[in-house]
Amino acid sequence: MESILFYVPLAIGVLGNILYNIFAKSTPENANTFASLTLTYAAGMAATFILYMVTSGGGNIVAEFAKANWASYALGLCIVGCDVAIILLYRAGWDLSVGTLVGNISLSLCLAVIGVIFWHESLGPIKIVGILVCIAGLYIVNRPEKTTVGSAEQAQPQSAESEV
């Protein structure tokens, strides 16, 4: 049972991120990013309020707010930055299959360094090999595709248009 509880948050996160990216890519390009996100946060606020009421048995939410610190506000600002970045990433033409892959691998590499420097997390040989594989993966998914010899076209980056 303990191992299931260990992986449930990961599964919820993966499913949530799959849906998040599909919905972010589906945001109309002619919709103002910030108006759209205002609706997103209203839906999120309603969902979190309902989940609070269900999990607390209708407790005192104001008292719970008083327990929060600066991190709740900072997290809110970070969420706005992440959401704006994802919408703009797709509007700039990144493929669903590549854009967040590059972003999340880059994020993971940065967090590995931050974890070692600030939290003194271990970085053994296996983890170093994993980091090198991630760096190689970033190169592979970002390199331009070569055209055949004699073709008039130049090397083109991977995109949905070039795959059609």
Image (cartoon, rainbow, N blue to C red):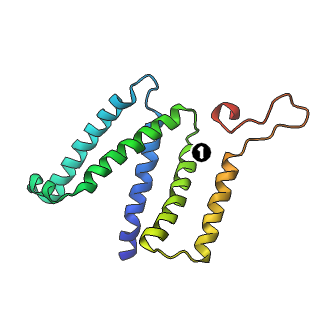
Please say whether residue 133 is visible from this viewpoint. yes
From the image, tell me which residue sits under label 1.
98
Residue 111 location (% of width, % of height): 48, 61
Residue 163 location (% of width, % of height): 69, 35
User: In the displayed image of the protein, which residue is found farthest to the right?
Assistant: 150
Q: Is residue 4 above or below residue 82?
A: below
Residue 122 location (% of width, % of height): 50, 76
**Which residue is found at the position 30% from the left and 33% from the top?**
38
Q: Amino acid at mark 1?
A: Val
Q: Quadrant of the N terminus?
A: bottom left
Q: Is residue 63 left or right of residue 92?
A: left
**Front residue of 116 and 96:** 116
**Which residue is found at the position 28% from the left and 43% from the top?**
44
User: In the displayed image of the protein, which residue is found farthest to the top?
Assistant: 30
**Front residue of 117 and 112:** 117
Q: Is residue 163 left or right of residue 22?
A: right
Q: Quadrant of the C terminus?
A: top right
Residue 144 location (% of width, % of height): 73, 41
Please say whether residue 1 is visible from this viewpoint. no
Q: Secondary structure at mark 1?
A: loop
Q: Is residue 141 left or right of residue 73?
A: right
**Which residue is found at the position 30% from the left and 47% from the top?**
76
